[in-house]
Amino acid sequence: MKVAEAVGRALCAAGVDQVFGVVGSGNFHVTNALVAAGARFVAARHEGGAATMADAYARTSGTVAVVSVHQGPGLTNAMTGITEAAKSRTPLVVLAAEVTEPRSNFYVDQEALAHAVGAVPVRVTSAEEAVEQACVAVGLAVRERRTVLLNLPLPVQALEVPDGALARAAPLPQRVAVEPDADRVADLSRLLGQARRPVFVAGRGARGAGCREVLEALAERHGALLATSAVAHGLFHGNPWSLGISGGFASPLACELIQGADLIVGWGCALNMWTMRHGQLIGADTTVVQVDDDPSAPGLHRPVHLGVTGDVRLTARRVFEAAGEPGQGYRIPQIGAALAAGVRLRDVPYEDTSTRERIDPRTLSIALDDILPAERVVGVDSGNFMGYPSAYLSVPDEKGFCFTQAFQSIGLGLATTIGAALAQPDRLPVAALGDGGALMSAVELDTVRRLGLPMVVVVYDDEAYGAEVHHFGPDGHPLDTVRFPPTDIAAVGRGHGFEAVTVRTQADLKAVADWVAGPRTAPLLVDAKVVADHGSWWLEEAFRGH
């Protein structure tokens, strides 16, 4: 058995069962070995899409995934998706063929590329160690929640592995939950017992199994209101004391209540400028606590009064077991009634600016939320539009929303939704894109159709890179570089085998309702021509960090 086959089989033996990629000569044999060993392979049309599909699959399934790419340009094409995954600490293995001869036109310093974007490089160096080194890559990805670049040099791929080498393949490792310090647990228990208006903000680190239940139990004991960062959207869906997303996508009532907290506890949440609106959601006298299993996380983005290093579920359980003083906290009848009446942005009155030619994105999003089935998984691209689907489309739980925004790259939303759809096959996948991101990634519409995904792709089309229009326009700068003539994006969808509808008014959405009620034999693209006369509310917050 050659190294290429042994590495593919070793990765499967280590627990990998889902692979995305674009196959070239350098990764042909190792990819085929993965498939032969039982992994499912999804061929993307571009390596950037493949990397983001793998990232989203890993996030939404809770398992490690692999993206397989050709040497040199195959890897460089994938780098934006890899960077997003690395910045998000997604457990992902990038399996890349590698040339070692600097005179080759395929040569790039692949190890340096990994370091440059925060990924961890691992190289297969010999036939004798190939299996162990492949398993090391999976172990790093899982135990340390890292994106790992596994370089597979072409000369090494062709070598014969020793007999019995595959017997040394290690099964998928388990991440060990970090036990919190007992004194810090006692400190947090005391602070909760003293708090009159506590708020929990759960982030990426609270998406694990069992986290919701223990956080809700602890919050109930101390009367805490519940919020999430954008990446954990849906975690507390259905809880009557949930505020929804904290930060730029929050409703006015949610912001008011978070600002009024005397104690904010971030559970696996960075409490960064997005989630805390550059600190505006933290009152002058508010005590801030941050719980994270990464010891470098507490205080990284803003000062905290107490940092607790520990697994979120385990820490919350230990605090609950400490039996701190229970209290009504923030959960008084008046607040309960206010939350029921208007904590969702869709319940907040607004002036509908729709015309005969363009629909208000709020009106569009509210209507889609009503039309589309509740059991959905939503992927969102980046751009001026992104707050509308994030804030107005409800999701059933934290696995119903995939937010690949750590690198703030336009063009990842469609691939994000493909990966999430494959991880949650019983839900309707909904991709929310701007026209810029949709046209950047249109090549993957072919992948949606080829896979037979019953996806709804919603394009918020303002014929511009809207973020730049609304950021620079008020100062009188010329905007020709960021505005575009009309594009029939519905026709692009039809060309890829989609059903498609152009939406200019709310009445046009009947075609979407008909599709939902029908057999859904083809995916649906909604080319929504949205009003473009003002920037989104969250954009003003975002640009304060630029």
Image: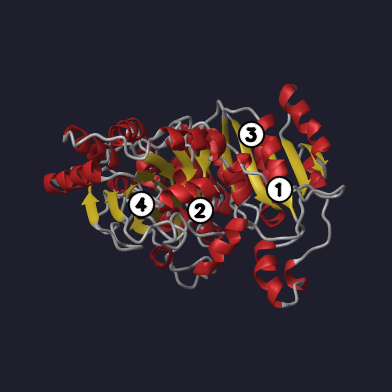
Amino acid at the residue labelled 1: Pro
In this rendered view, identify the residue nearer to me: 124 or 65: 65
Residue 545 or residue 95, whichever sits in front: 545
Disc 1 designates what residue?
A: 361
Q: CA distance from mark 3 to mark 4?
A: 28 Å
C-alpha distance separating marks 1 and 3: 29 Å
Label 2: how many Cα within 10 Å (few below 14, some 14–19, many 20+)? many
Separation of disc 4 and disc 2 at Cα? 24 Å
Q: Nearer the viewer, mark 2 or mark 1?
A: 1
Residue plotted at (30% across, 57% down): 297
> Separation of disc 4 and disc 1 at Cα?
36 Å
- Residue at image x 39%, y 52%? 89
Q: Nearer the viewer, mark 3 or mark 4?
A: 4
Residue projecting furthest to the left: 183
Label drawn at residue 451:
3
Is residue 465 toward the left or the right of residue 23 in the image?
right
In the rendered image, the quadrant that contains the N terminus is top left
Label 3 with label 2: CB-CB less than 8 Å: no
| Dot 1: element | helix
Give the residue number, with chain letter if any, for mark 4. Answer: 146
Labels 3 and 4 touching (C-beta < 8 A) = no
Q: Quadrant of residue 311?
A: top left
Give the crowd class for mark 4: few <14, some 14-19, many >=20 residues within 10 Å. Answer: many
Amino acid bearing label 4: Arg
Picture quadrant of residue 161: top left
The mark that comes first in sequence, 2 or 1, is 2
